[in-house]
Amino acid sequence: MTHATPHTPPVSPMGPERASSPGNGPSRRLLARLGRLSAGWVLLVVGLITAPTPLPIGLPLIALALGLLARDSERVRRAVRWVRGRVGALDRGLRRIEPKLPRPVVWVLHATDPHVPVLGSSSPKPAPVSSV
C-alpha cells in the first residue's frame, strides 16, 4: 500500500504569494515603468531648479533622474550617449567609477556608452571583399 502525498505546487523565487498572482502581468510592469518615468521627470525638474543653488544638490538629482529615465526611454539613452560622446571628461569619469557601482547602474552606464555599438542600429556594414 502506497501513501499518496498531497501535491504541493513549486514555490516561486519571488515567494509563494507572488508566484501566480494575477497582478504580476503586464499591467504591473507598466505601472512600475510609469512610476520610474514620473519620478525621473520630477527629479530632473527639481534638479534643474536646484542646480544653481550654493549647495550641490541639483547635480546628483539630475544624475539620478537621468539614470531612471534612461532605463525606460530610448530617447533619453540616445541623448545621454550623445552628451557622453561630446564631453570626454564625463565619459572617462563614468568609465572609471563603473566597476564600483551596483549592477542596475552599470547597465544604464553601458546602455549610454558612446563606444558600445547599439543593437539594431543602422551602422555601416563592411564592404564585401572581391576575389578578382
Image (cartoon, grey):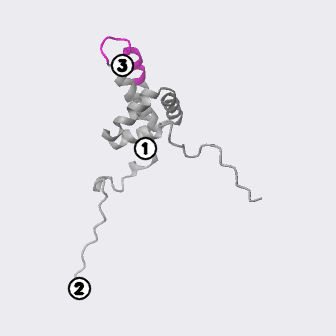
Residue 29 tag number: 1
- Magenta residues span 43-56
Residue at horizontal 36%, vertical 53%?
21
Residue 58 tag number: 3
Q: Is 120 covered by the magenta stretch?
A: no
Of 60 and 98, which appears nearest the observer? 98
Amino acid, disc 1: Arg
Disc 1/disc 2 C-alpha distance (Å): 45 Å
Foreground mark, 1 or 2? 1
Give the structural element (helix, strand or loop) at label 1.
helix
Of 56 and 10, which appears nearest the observer? 56
Q: Quadrant of residue 60?
A: top left
Q: Which residue is mark 2?
A: 2
Q: Where is residue 84 shown, x and y percent of the image?
A: 48, 30
Amino acid, disc 2: Thr
Q: Residues within 10 Å of mark 3 (few under 14, many from 20)?
A: many
- Of marks 1 and 2, which one's residue comes earlier in the chain? 2
Disc 3/disc 1 C-alpha distance (Å): 29 Å
Q: Where is residue 24 shown, x and y percent of the image?
A: 39, 49
Foreground mark, 3 or 2? 3
Q: Where is residue 5 shown, x and y percent of the image?
A: 24, 76
Picture layout, residue 21 above or below residue 102: below
Q: Residues within 10 Å of mark 2 (few under 14, many from 20)?
A: few
